[in-house]
Image: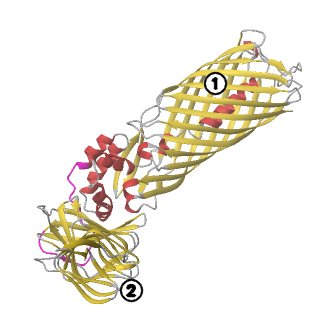
Amino acid sequence: GITGLSANAVTSGSTLLAAAGNDYIGASLDTLNNTGTVASPTALYIAATGALGTLANSGTISGNVVNLSANDLVVAGGTDAAPGALTGGTITNTRSDLRFVRGVMMLNDRITVGSHSVVNSGATLLVNSAVNITGSYSQTAGNLVIGVSSTTSYGALVISGSASLTGGSVTLAAVNGGQLSAGSYTIASAGSTLTTSNLTLTAAGYTVTSSTITANGATDLVLTLSSGSGGTTGPTGPTNPATPSTRYTAVGLAAGGPGVGTGRALDVIANSGSAAAQAFQTAVLTRLSKLSGEAQQLAVTQLSPSQLTPQINTFSVTPSTNAISQHQQHAAAYMDGPMGDVNGKGAAAGSDGQQGAVWGEILGGGVLRGNNADAAGYSGTTAGLVIGADWYANDTVMAGLAFSWLNGSVNGEGTAAGGQTKAASYQLTAYSVWRPDWADQRLSVEGQASFGYNHYDQRRWIGFLGARANANYGGEQYLGKVTVGYDLPVSASFTLTPQASLRAVRLTNHAYDEHDAGVANMAVGALKVDNLTQELGAKLSGKMDTGLGRLLPDLRLVWVHDYLNSPIATTSVLAGTSFVSSTGRTAADGLGIGVGATLDQGDGFKLRLEYSGELRRDYQSHAGVLHATFDF
């Protein structure tokens, strides 16, 4: 057989004949005329040895069209009354350009031209659905007619490469019983650059303007119809899409959380005539209006300020603060009292046998929050170091200073999926322990005061735009904490210590401007977040001798309660409109867990391993610490 030739067996009387089922060109042919219907899996095949001058099609070619020759495939169409049609397959023409030169042609095929172009230099192309072009598109004359059934169902060119429309016209026309209406229509999308000039834009009964929108490497050509008559020549600036008042307010209310404030802001922008609002209407609201209900709720939430950073206001504080608290309690056990003299040398901390200590910790942990109606979830990790020095004024008072560095990263989930915040925290903490003689050193009072600086590297993902708004900024944190415990010996080796603590934290984040997301970038105001957290519980401590030295295990369980638990409000400016959005905090109540063990070999060096965790509704955190102390 001949590759590309389709033949069927037919009979004529008693004679068996082979009848061609498609058009096959293996040599030179000036013009191939088709006025009827050619329907075959491969309707037209031009071999590498073939040469076709012009395909004149005023009928229908249904099936694949293949041109393996290096000659341009030149196509002419029919008339307005009897247009030609290319449908039901793929046009493969990867060794040359595909050129539409005259006549009217209904285009309903996929087109693959590789590194070459589809060129319209004088034909009228009727496009009633999405036509995918692998390659580039160029229009220097002729007419591109986009058939419109509704504002959400209309034709378009989807081009993988570049597009250039520098002549002729683009027309929007009602088809299939539909009608034109005011609004915006994305009629071409290019994976690379898209340029326009000298175009006549028409739509019966409307004024037409055009704009190009570039996002995530792709460029769209958007035509906007507004009430009027006639056409507009040449691309012009953006115009207001037809966006009903309070449309997005309802969407934001349905989305909940930060979407509530953002939805109201979008309606303000939709009805504004400012230049910033008009650019936003064309680039963002046009696309937003085409999404389904649930997709719109997600999009409105993603147009809100980052949900991650406000939620992690204690993310960079808690691990180092808890680690220092554990060190304080560990040091208190070496001062006189029921657990004093645990080093077995008869010299408690603060006596002539010990005047101080230097210590260090390696921290690591993770956090997970589930999604709910008030805020998106996230998962994150932390890692860092703490170094400190203790000074014992006497056997009842110890003071110290610690420096901590913590690096953390959280990744959004749910409506915040694709978003990320990285935080680097530097904290200086002064701390103390007091075990008064008048309480027989059973009472311990531990205090902390710290100042820290945080640096944030933030990413906000806007999925329906394929854009990411980035920001880098800083902030400060201030902390005060008091813990009170009272030792109750339960045996010679174990002590139960009821404990209560109160921690106050103020976090301030600087104002910042986003970048890299075009008109969807925000200017976000400074943020202040206060936390007041109580812990109430008990710690069980023990001591036992092993072949490696004295082992000091402990177990701690506490009830955690946040007194300040209202949503966190963030003020932002989007497209010239200021608004407030809110993000819910974690549940107010939870369970804190601590498990640790210290190994003391009696030579002034101690090694400790501990775990701490916190469990709340839709939230959990876990941390591990390796702690080393050297007494002097």
Query: In this figure, which residue is indicated by the disc labeled 2?
Result: 49
In this view, which residue lies farthest toward the front? 14
Q: Amino acid at mark 1?
A: Thr
Query: In this figure, which residue is indicated by the disc labeled 1?
Result: 483
**Sequence order check, earlier mark of 1 and 2:** 2
Mark 2 and mark 1 in contact (Cβ < 8 Å)? Answer: no
**Cα–Cα span, label 1 and label 2:** 90 Å
Give the vertical position of 385 relative to 335 (above or below).
Answer: below
Residue beneath the point at 73% across and 20% down: 435
> Magenta includes 175?
no
> Magenta includes 236?
yes
Q: Quadrant of residue 178?
A: bottom left
Which colouring convention does the figure follow? secondary structure
Q: Nearer the viewer, residue 83 or 459?
A: 83
x, y percent for residue 580: 36, 46
SS class, disc 1: strand
* Range of magenta residues: 228-247
Q: Residues within 10 Å of mark 1 (few under 14, many from 20)?
A: many
Give the vertical position of 53 relative to 341 (above or below).
Answer: below
x, y percent for residue 318: 60, 35
Q: Amino acid at mark 2?
A: Thr
Q: Nearer the viewer, residue 435 or 215?
A: 215
Depth-wise, is mark 1 or mark 2 nearer the camera?
Answer: 2
